[in-house]
Image (cartoon, rainbow, N blue to C red):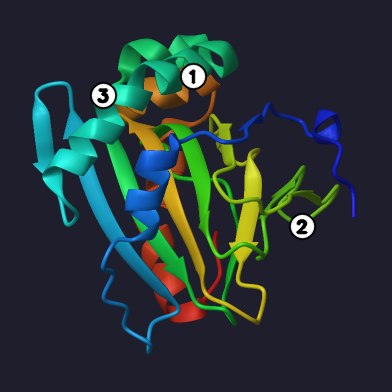
Amino acid sequence: MNSDITKLNYKLKIIDNFLSETIYKKLCNLDIKKDKNKDFNIYHNEVNNSGVIKSVINRDLLMEIHKNYHPLAMNILKEICPEKVKLYDYSDFTIVVTSKNTKFPIHDDTPDKLLSGVIYLLPEINSGTYFYNTRKGDNKTQIEWKTNRAVFFSRIERETWHSYEGDKKTDRLALVYNLKTTQIKKVYEIEKKNYFIGNLRWKLSPYIYEYFKTII
């Protein structure tokens, strides 16, 4: 499998040891109540510079992460897609537990995500994130799993294709860190994509996935 990110049609930013040891351990030790009947257990937490918007984890921990890593995340966005920096509204920190036998299909992320990031938490060995140049899976590139490794990119409509899955041995615990916006139309203007078609696809995709387990 190809692991040369320079062959992708878009930029990735990979940072090892992204979180401090203290914050990393706090996240790994969270008391997460998993539903074993679900393929994905997802816990959203939202924050902006004014404070916590919503939280299912410790609010102090959430603000600690935001305070320490927001400037870095904004600099990464400035490096990858500087035009989108002005659209930032809030941050989303989502704990995602992927069942060991589950795979999320190839997709390109929703337009409200200015910067998409994932930090691998647990276990020591699992399956990394896969990136592609096409929805069909051309030029499959894996960013291998390494605890506390972060991978960032700025989504582009129907271009930043990627997927992730369990390794069929152990559930996969990750922190998804997104810089987000409510200014969706401006996102499409920056990306030079069709707002009407893209926005309709965004609204329909959750229902298509729920019933057909595929992404349009």
Spatial CA distance of label 1 from label 3 is 17 Å
Label 1 packing within 10 angstroms: few (<14), some (14-19), many (20+): many
In the rendered image, the residue lying farthest to the bottom is 37
Q: First in sequence: mark 3 or mark 2?
A: 3
Residue 122 seen in this snapshot: yes
Q: Which label was assigned to residue 77?
A: 1
The vertical placement of 207 against 91, above or below, is: below
Find numbered disc 1 in the image and state the secondary structure of the residue it sits on: helix
Measured from the top left, where is residue 6 in percent x and y?
83, 28
Residue holding disc 3:
67
Q: Amino acid at mark 3?
A: Lys
What residue do we see at 56% from left, 70% from top? 214
Label 3 packing within 10 angstroms: few (<14), some (14-19), many (20+): few
What residue do we see at 32% from left, 78% from top? 34
Q: First in sequence: mark 1 or mark 3?
A: 3
The vertical placement of 48 against 4, above or below, is: above
**Are the residues at dot 1 and dot 3 in contact (C-beta closer than 8 Å)?**
no
Question: Quarter of the image containing the C terminus?
Answer: bottom right
Q: Which label was assigned to residue 136?
A: 2
Question: Position of 111 compared to 158: left or right?
Answer: left
Q: Amino acid at mark 1?
A: Leu
Question: Position of 63 compared to 141: left or right?
Answer: left
Label 2 packing within 10 angstroms: few (<14), some (14-19), many (20+): few
Instruction: Using the image as rendered, state which of residue 61 and residue 204 is in the foreground.
Output: 61
Question: Quarter of the image containing the N terminus?
Answer: bottom right
Observer-side mark, 2 or 1, equals 1
Spatial CA distance of label 2 from label 1 is 27 Å
Residue 182 seen in this snapshot: no
